[in-house]
Image: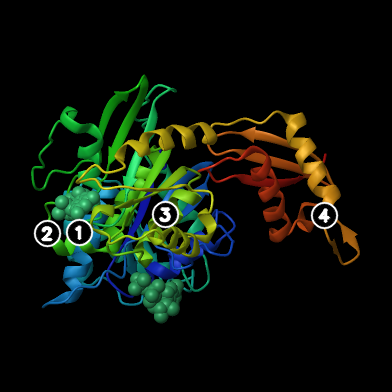
């Protein structure tokens, strides 16, 4: 169910972001090429040999203080060790084995995560001798790659996905709604979990240094079963660690993958920042139902326009998630808290909604009649037939004469018509155009 995470670790300048961009920029990556989806990516989705994964570039963590480079490398490694299922340890053939590489290796050795060594900057595959010294790292056969030429990356992914665990983790029953709470530190995730659970909350304290995933808390309310997937868990590691965006993103990513409904928490007191967008964007891309939860509403000075204004700010910032309802509440005073679970139930239903084929086709053909696809170099897209092939998220396939003639704006038009007819509130819709066979 949950997508495994592959993390790229290594000292600065070995080429992590180059390789990361090649992997997600490639045909194998599922990249949302739509306006409004943030471009500044920290993670991407990929698939290799039929295995889907998320990939994270742990580079670029910057912190102040002495020995900054080693500190930041150490943090990346810690991050990866904690959150990833497989680690790509990247080194640089041109620079050879360095002291910093050894330090990273020491940290990775202590973990029990599967590791594959990628030797980058092997621009000339006739000179594979350069990679042998990296056997000394102790992680088996290094794989030669070149970010500049794009060579070896298939071999690298092959090795990485072969190390992915097969584990199928927890399987909750179909009727359980899995809810993840995501948002930057201090937005009120723990407080909201406590507020929802009330006295039922079992306080699980955190032993420093223990590695484990998000805590799941099952509960039942008004006959509906839920599981809260709480990413707030490990917070006792100190501010630097916690405040790094990549750390939050990786934690959020894991929780989102396992959820049906994602509560995207926003701090009503402070407003929206870039990090909120990264996190929400992932819920969208992962095809999950989402709700914006504006927390700390108790401390916001309000008049009769405040909520409306806040909502339009959210809509402006999250253009790609106009389907997600917005709930205002306070986890501390519990003001408006009772509004939340009914919305969770509603978006979960919408996420699982299945539209009968004939109804869908009525809507699609009416939309086409009203506004036919524009011609492109004298050719016109002809859509013959629409069918919903999956739920969670609702996924619709349009069979057409030539899928290349489908434009983003026309797809968006059809999506709007489909939403106008069937609602699908709170859930992304996926639309694919296939050639009619
Ligand atoms: P990061 O700090 O590990 O993310 O490294 P970057 O991806 O930013 O790359 C560092 C530098 O190495 C950049 O100048 C890249 O252009 C260069 N680089 C990346 N891959 C290769 C490669 O395969 N061959 C060569 N010669 N240079 C590369
Ligand atoms: P987390 O890091 O997202 O889990 O955030 P916490 O739940 O630990 O909350 C961070 C801080 O915000 C704590 O001091 C909370 O008491 C406070 N807080 C959380 N929710 C609310 C709220 O609805 N109203 C107010 N006034 N403070 C809140």
According to the image, label 2 marks what residue? 238
- Relative image position of residue 201 (x, y in whole percent): 17, 31
Residue sitting nearer the eye, 282 or 161: 282
Q: CA distance from mark 2 to mark 4?
A: 56 Å
- Which of discs 2 and 4 lies nearer the camera? The answer is 4
Give the residue at the far top of this rendering: 223
Q: CA distance from mark 3 to mark 2?
A: 24 Å
- Closer to the camera: disc 1 or disc 3? 3
Q: Of callouts 2 and 4, which one flags the residue occurring earlier in the amino acid sequence?
A: 2
Front-most of 339 and 56?
Answer: 339
- Residue position marked by numbered label 4 in the rendering: 371
Q: Are marks 2 and 4 in contact (CB under 8 Å)?
A: no
Q: Position of residue 413 (x, y in %)?
A: 71, 54
Label 4: few (<14), some or many (≥20) within 10 Å? few
- Which mark is first along the chain, 1 or 4? 1
Point out which mark residue 242 bears. Answer: 1
- Residue 245 vs residue 388: left or right? left
x and y percentages locating residue 51 in the rendered image: 49, 42
Mark 2 to mark 1 CA distance (whole Å): 6 Å
Q: How are the colours assigned in the image?
A: rainbow
């Amino acid at each position: 169910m949950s997508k495994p995470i592959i993390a790229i670790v290594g000292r600065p300048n070995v080429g992590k972001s180059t390789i990361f961009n090649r992997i997600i920029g490639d045909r194998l990556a599922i990249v949302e090429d739509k306006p409004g989806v943030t471009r500044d990516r920290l993670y991407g989705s990929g698939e290799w040999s039929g295995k889907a994964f998320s990939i994270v570039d742990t580079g670029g963590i910057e912190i102040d203080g002495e020995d900054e480079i080693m500190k930041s490398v150490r943090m990346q490694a810690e991050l990866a060790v904690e959150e990833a299922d497989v680690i790509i340890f990247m080194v640089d053939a041109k620079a050879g084995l360095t002291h910093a590489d050894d330090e990273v290796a020491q940290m990775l050795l202590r973990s029990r995560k599967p590791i594959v060594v990628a030797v980058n900057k092997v621009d000339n595959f006739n000179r594979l001798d350069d990679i042998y010294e990296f056997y000394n790292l102790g992680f088996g056969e290094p794989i030669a790659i070149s970010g500049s030429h794009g060579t070896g990356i298939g071999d690298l992914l092959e090795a990485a996905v072969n190390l992915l665990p097969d584990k199928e983790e927890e399987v909750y029953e179909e009727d359980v709604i899995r809810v993840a709470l995501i948002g930057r530190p201090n937005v009120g995730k723990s407080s909201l979990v406590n507020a929802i659970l009330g006295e039922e909350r079992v306080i699980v304290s955190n032993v420093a240094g223990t590695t484990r995933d998000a805590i799941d808390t099952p509960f039942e309310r008004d006959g509906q079963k839920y599981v809260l997937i709480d990413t707030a868990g490990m917070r006792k590691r100190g501010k630097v660690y916690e405040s790094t965006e990549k750390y939050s993103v990786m934690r959020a990513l894991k929780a989102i993958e396992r959820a049906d409904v994602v509560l995207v928490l926003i701090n009503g007191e402070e407003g929206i920042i870039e990090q909120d967008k990264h996190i929400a964007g992932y819920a969208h891309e992962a095809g999950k139902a989402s709700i914006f939860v504006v927390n700390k509403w108790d401390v916001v000075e309000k008049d009769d326009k405040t909520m409306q204004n806040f909502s339009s700010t959210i809509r402006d910032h999250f253009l790609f998630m106009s389907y997600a309802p917005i709930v205002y509440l306070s986890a501390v005073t519990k003001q408006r808290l009772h509004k939340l679970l009914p919305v969770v139930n509603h978006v979960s239903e919408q996420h699982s909604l299945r539209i009968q084929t004939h109804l869908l086709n009525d809507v699609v053909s009416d939309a086409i009649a009203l506004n036919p696809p524009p011609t492109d170099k004298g050719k016109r897209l002809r859509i013959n037939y629409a069918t919903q092939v999956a739920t969670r998220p609702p996924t619709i396939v349009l069979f057409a004469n030539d899928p290349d003639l489908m434009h983003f704006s026309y797809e968006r038009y059809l999506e709007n018509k489909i939403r106008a007819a069937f609602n699908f509130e709170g859930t992304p819709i996926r639309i694919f155009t296939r050639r009619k066979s």
